[in-house]
Image (spheres, rainbow, N blue to C red):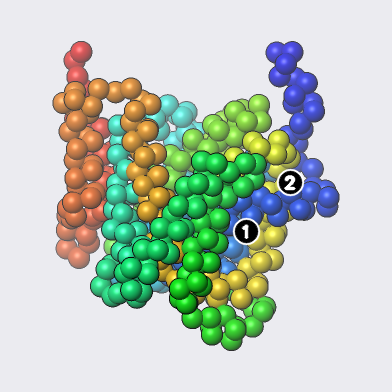
Amino acid sequence: MSSASPRREYLPTDYNLRFRDCLIGAQMLFVAFGALVLVPILTGLDSNVALFTAGVGTLLFQICTRGKVPIFLASSFAFIAPIIYGVQTWGMAQTLGGLVCSGFVYFILSGLIRWRGIDVVLRVLPPVVTGPVIMVIGLILAPVAVNMALGKTGDGAVQLVPEETALWVSMTSLLVTVLVSLLGKGFLRLMPILCGIVAGFAAALYFGLGDWTKVAATPWMSLPNFTSPEFAWEPILFIMPITLAPAIEHFGDIVAISSITGKDYLKDPGVHTTMFGDGVATMAAGMVGGPPCTTYAEVIGAVSLTRVFNPAVMTWAALTAILLSFVSKIGAFLSSIPVPVMGGIMILLFGAIMVVGLNTLVRAGKDLMEPRNMIIVALIIIFGVGGMQFSIGSFKLGGIGLAAVTGVALNLFLPRSRT
């Protein structure tokens, strides 16, 4: 008790907006930048819009939580595969409609938690369900990463860069990302993705890759390329179940930031409130053409490193993101980065997502050879990765959405072991 109180007095957690903190806020955005723009680069969304919605989403989250939680919201990796599939199947506008409606899942979970407490969510979504669903996200994306690392389009249909050259570039970006993750010190260790992009970009320039005419032709300042959603049942029902994965991640991030700051944000403002704020941010992002928002573990790491617990720092990070979203050359440059640069990073990134899911299972300490657990895990992974698809009329459910629905249904209806 005596050791905790002085630390909180010395490191205040109250919201205090001061101009002198603007550079710290910009640093927080810099930590998130590589991951933030990676989602739009991979999915075809506009990078400047993603910056704008990350800033606006964070501000909306702060309003909902009354400025109590020092956390930053930006592009969610969980939606990369569904956005790619959705755009190919229904087009960008209807996919955005599905992303908007994914925010309702946060509202439903928020209402459940407010009504019955967090235990009801943990019963519906135990680690034996959430772990393999997260694993499916990484495994489904694995072929996209490998194809891009080999210089192809994500679906492998077109060779964009000679394979040998592509491997040199992609392995450079992968190696630097790994080395910075393992050996980096201070803030550098929090930015392995950004360092990998820089190294891969340098290798690409060495091999003469890239077309920069678009960057030169783009004006410095302009409005982000906002896009309006359209709503159709099929993409909505396909995308909404996927929201369970980032919702689970959200809960873990709130636990983490509570541990770092010494304040129990699960109670004040309450995880039902933070979940609601995440849903509001996600819906707002989809309404203007941005990727769904989620809490960022990278920035939580930066908070732990800097020991700056003032939530107003995230306000400065959000305002910086909004300001940069009007610098149109940023988006033009990011969209011109050669494919192998991102491919190398994606191999590690998507593999890491799979490992997070695996770690969820390991930490739960469940016997996976017990028939009930084995059935749930096996069917989630094989249905999700194997391409299983169920159709009702024109509606089709497959991939991550089917994996999530399968896991929840099996957990609710399979009889539990008597031992």
35 and 8: which one is in front? 35
Tell me the crowding category of disc 2: few under 14, some 14 to 19, or many 20 or more residues within 10 angstroms, Cα based.
many
* Quadrant of the image occupied by residue 368: top left
Q: Element type at marker 2? A: helix
Q: Could you tell whether 173 is left or right of 125 in the image? A: right
Q: Which mark is residue 56?
A: 1
Q: Position of residue 297 (x, y in %)?
A: 54, 43
Q: Could you tell whether 358 is left or right of 57 in the image? A: left
Total number of numbered discs in the rendering: 2
Q: Look at the numbered discs 2 and 1 and tell me whether their residues touch, using CB distance below 8 Å.
A: no
Residue type indicated by callout 1: Val
Q: Report the residue at 55% width, 76% height from top.
A: 332
Q: Report the residue at 29% width, 46% height from top.
A: 136
253 and 172: which one is in front? 172
In the rendered view, tell whether residue 245 sits above or below residue 389: above
Q: Which mark is residue 312?
A: 2
From where the camera sits, is residue 350 visible?
yes
What distance separates the C-alpha of mark 2 from that of mark 1?
14 Å
Tell me the crowding category of disc 1: few under 14, some 14 to 19, or many 20 or more residues within 10 angstroms, Cα based.
many
Q: Element type at marker 1? A: helix
